Amino acid sequence: MRILKGKKVAGRILNDIECNIKRDKLKPELAVILVGENKASEIYVKLKGKAAKKTGIDFSLFKFKKTEKENEIIRKIQELNENKKICGIIVQLPLPVKFNTQKIINSINLSKDVDGFHPKNVKKFIKNEADIWPVFPHAIVRLIKSSGVKVKNKKAVILANSMRFGEVMKAALNNKGMKAEYILTKNLNRNLKKFNKVDIVVSAVGKPGIIIGEMIKKSAVVIDGGITKKGKKVFGDVDFDSVKNIAGYLTPVPGGVGPVTIACLLENVYLAAKKQSK
């Protein structure tokens, strides 16, 4: 089995972004909205800022307490929408439970939605009409391609917590020539046999060890997009020990999908900056 190292894939993407920004003489700036004091979110934001600095993307962080009024956060986003220096805006998720996440994301200008979360951008992506990819599905596709496996007409199964993610991930894989379907976690037990018949398995549900070796076809590409923290340890959806001698390729957790997701985000910032500069 070969481990698909996300840091290596991300490094190549970040190098390309840096070169492209210099070549195009751009000055991209990413604005990040962080609400509350979620420790994991704070770590992710720092990683995004560090990666942005490497590529030449300016990084502005706007922090709000969880006691802040929702309208104040939306007002800040609207202000950033009007700021021509800012070419990308993201809201670090999850938000504290009292906030309407979708309402806040909907306030981001479509052209600055570099996460690809706005429902109008999601709809365009599913129709294969989007200018940029949503970052998480793009990271998964990049990791699959990094295996070197020829993916055209290969069958894939996605384990998802929601129809929305399932549809987006399915569209991402189909866009690259795969024949994908998704299964919701609640329907997993009645669909276990489907996993043995596919060449590519993607899981992103945050349930440690839900994907086990006996589910996997020999030499399959397995992308573990789940992450769960228990104490100081981090776990993926894949039971590594039972899968490692069956899968042909597997992403680690941590160090798999995460770094590539950040790189794909910054790639979207560059693409947004390029489009807005015209």
Image (spheres, rainbow, N blue to C red):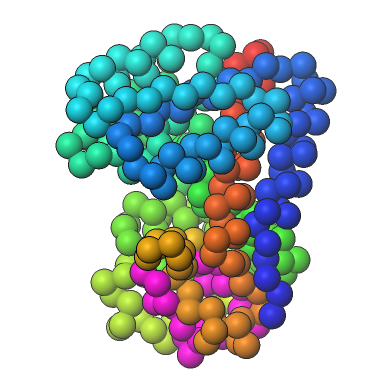
* Image location (x, y in percent) of residue 14: 71, 40
The magenta-colored residue range is: 200-224
Is-magenta flag for residue 212? Answer: yes
Seen at 38% across and 63% down, the residue is 231
Quadrant containing the C terminus in the rendered view: top right
Seen at 61% across and 21% down, the residue is 58
Left or right: 248, with 195 as reference point: right
Position of residue 73 relative to residue 194, above or below, is: above
Left or right: 45, with 118 as reference point: right
Residue 251 seen in this snapshot: yes
Position of residue 224 relative to residue 69, above or below, is: below
Residue 133 seen in this snapshot: no
Seen at 80% across and 31% down, the residue is 19
Farthest residue to the bottom: give it: 214
* Image location (x, y in percent) of residue 243: 55, 83
The number of callouts visible is 0
Position of residue 198 relative to residue 277, above or below, is: below
Farthest residue to the front: give it: 232
Quadrant containing the N terminus in the rendered view: bottom right
